[in-house]
Image (tube, helix red, strand yellow):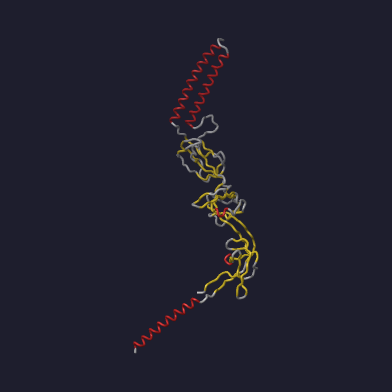
Amino acid sequence: MFKKLLRWFFAVLILSGIGYTFYFIYQKSLPKEEVSEVESPYIFNVVRKTVATGSIVPQREITIKSRVSGILEEIFVEAGQTVSLGQTIARIRIIPNAASLIQAESVVDRAKITVRDAELDYNRQKGLFDQQVISASDLQPIKLKWDLALQELEAAENNLEVVKEGATKKASQNSTIVLSTASGTVLDVPVKKGASIIESNNFNEGTTIATVADMKALMFKGNLDESEVGKIQEGLPIRIQIAAIPDKSIPAKLDYIAPKGTDVNGAIQFEIKAYIKPEKGSIIRAGYSANADIVLAQKDSVLCLKESTIKQEKEKRYVEVQAGATFEKRYVVCGISDDINTEIIQGIKQGEKVKSAKLDTP
């Protein structure tokens, strides 16, 4: 009797499991009930823009270099200090080249010998002239030869002084003194006292003593992808957001778009520039990273809908407008969009309800 009841129990259990399985499959096959959310059109300021990344740099940045080679004997400025045009930046101590020094000394010695010989010749001919043995025309070439020898000696002595000291005593400016070639703020002094300095010439860029820039004239310098550069033009208004000053933006206009792009990590980027002028009292440092919001189009106080509520049907766009308990399709004419908010020009009025999303019931 017990075994018979047990068999009946397992049979009922198996049939119940099979029945529940069929019921579950049937329920899953039924169409799911849709729950719709609605929202109304609203008044909004739509701004369509693109963003360029870059940094803040001075409009004019000058590197100051030495005109002579040697050792940096003194440096008179430091980063952050304001300098004026012609102010002394540094002093260079000349380390004479041994070969050049020997050659210059040899030229001086030869010039002295030439002067002594020309002087003896002149004195001898001058005595004959005084005795009226020779004429003034005969004496003149001898005097000229002596004068030229004196000039050559002076030139040789000046050259020797330049080799030793870097300048002559008669020179109005000592080439061992490095002067600022612009007024502004010292951004960097990359060398220290005692460093070896290479002169700037036609064959060598030379050692940079200091970098000076006018921090009252700054600009945004950034890059824009090739897919966006066709949408912009010079003169467009932009707003510059500086990472170090997140609560403030600087208005400017686009002043320059590079005519040629460059390959940056496999992507073609175009350089853009926008000149800015810091507000009085504000401190903006060179090298700040920044983004430029370039306004492509803007409309204020226009009727808008969320971009997600607008659907596409071939070349037309439509929304589903609430009509009682159902929704009806209505075609709309759209204006500008910032990818979140879209301007509605025609097709719907303020106060109407639009289907915004579908949520599947669990």
In percent of width and height, residue 114 lies at 49, 20
Residue at image point 55% right, 19% down: 144
In percent of width and height, residue 43 lies at 63, 65
**Vertical position of residue 153 compared to residue 331: above or below:** above
State which quadrant residue 137 falls in.
Answer: top right
Residue at image point 65% right, 65% down: 346
State the residue lying farthest toward the bottom.
Answer: 1
Of residues 274 and 159, the one drawn nearer to the viewer in this rendering: 274
**Vertical position of residue 295 compared to residue 145: above or below:** below
Of residues 69 and 34, the one drawn nearer to the viewer in this rendering: 34
State which quadrant residue 36 falls in.
Answer: bottom right
State the residue lying farthest toward the front.
Answer: 314
Residue at image point 56% right, 57% down: 247
**Vertical position of residue 32 compared to residue 336: above or below:** below
Residue at image point 47% right, 37% down: 198
In percent of width and height, residue 184 lies at 56, 44
